[in-house]
Amino acid sequence: MRTTLSDLTESYPGESFTPSLVCPVCAGSSRILHLASNIHPDKPYAFNLRVCSTCSHGWIDPMPTQGLLNHLYARRSRSVIGEWGTSPLTIPEQVCVQREMKRPPARYFELGVGQGHLYQLFVEHGWKCTGVDPGDWAGRFPNVYRDLSDVDPALSADLLVAFDVLEHVSDPVSILRSLRKLAAPKARLYCAMPNRESLRARRDRQQWRMVRPLGHVNYYSKKSITRALKLAGFAVRYVRATDLNELRFPRRRQDIKPALIEMLGLGDQWIVIAERR
Ligand SMILES: [Zn+2]
């Protein structure tokens, strides 16, 4: 039997999907670029992948509501949870550690604590840490809440991190606005999200490895992430596209192509550092 949208809601009682024809970032008009097959192994469903004619942002249509997404993450649904990598720190996490860990400990906030490798590191280095993650798996760390609305609005974090978060939420600008409310003046925000202008994205189209609804529902261009951050009150200070799981110098012939993708900034993932305005 064919999967329907209601098969993907897993008894969620509220509104679960909405048609999503205009850009979630800039409200521009859109066209369908190709299909986007979901990641649930037993409930195959093809969404449309739409792109914005103004800012090149990409997203799936229909869009799951944030309520449904929270419900699915809390249940560890196969609709949203894929395999976790084994590498202790991802490249964006390494960039954050290299740039921030050497300064005196301050207030750290992380959205999407996940397995908590980075969070734990900041805790161990004496930072005052607060985090949010919708799943049970982050509950073993101190000060990690289920929802952004549970966090003390007077937090005033000096460093905020949201790696691999903005592709998972239905309304990224509203999430960024919530982060801004938790940020101290001049606080830095580190984030990472899929680059829909990458070499692989252009080549592989609907087979691109980042096309993973309902895990990934938003896909970013340089313009759309810059725009989303600006709308939320952040100024972009650094942006680069990366592709590798670990930084290394090419030694073998088969390593040259990945190194080139990296150098040319054509990688699958944006790393962005922004500052609260
Ligand atoms: Zn747009």
Image (cartoon, rainbow, N blue to C red):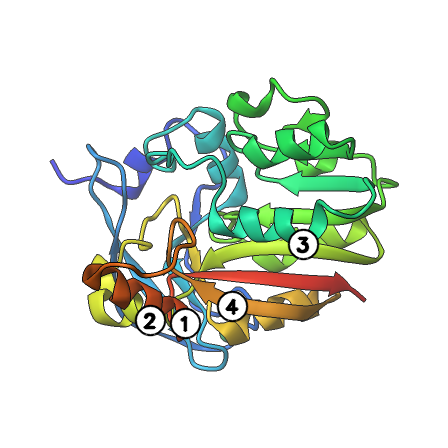
How far is disc 3 from disc 1 in space, using C-alphas? 20 Å
Q: Earlier in the sequence, mark 2 or mark 4?
A: 4
Residue lying at the far left in this picture: please name it.
1
How far is disc 4 from disc 1 in space, using C-alphas? 10 Å
In depth, the one of 186 and 247 nearer the eye is: 247
Q: Earlier in the sequence, mark 3 or mark 1?
A: 3
Q: Earlier in the sequence, mark 4 or mark 3?
A: 3
How far is disc 4 from disc 3 in space, using C-alphas? 15 Å
At numbered mark 3, what does the secondary structure look like: helix, strand or loop? Answer: helix
Is 157 left or right of 110, judged from the image as shown?
right
Q: Residues within 10 Å of mark 4 (few under 14, many from 20)?
A: some
Tell me where residue 146 appears, x and y as whole percent: 63, 28
Q: Amino acid at mark 2?
A: Leu
The disc at residue 240 is 4
Circles 3, 2 touching at the beta carbon (< 8 Å): no
Q: Amino acid at mark 3?
A: Arg
Tell me where residue 153 appears, x and y as whole percent: 83, 41
Q: Which residue is mark 2?
A: 260
Tell me where residue 68 appears, x and y as whole percent: 47, 38
Circles 2, 1 touching at the beta carbon (< 8 Å): yes
Is 151 left or right of 51, judged from the image as shown?
right
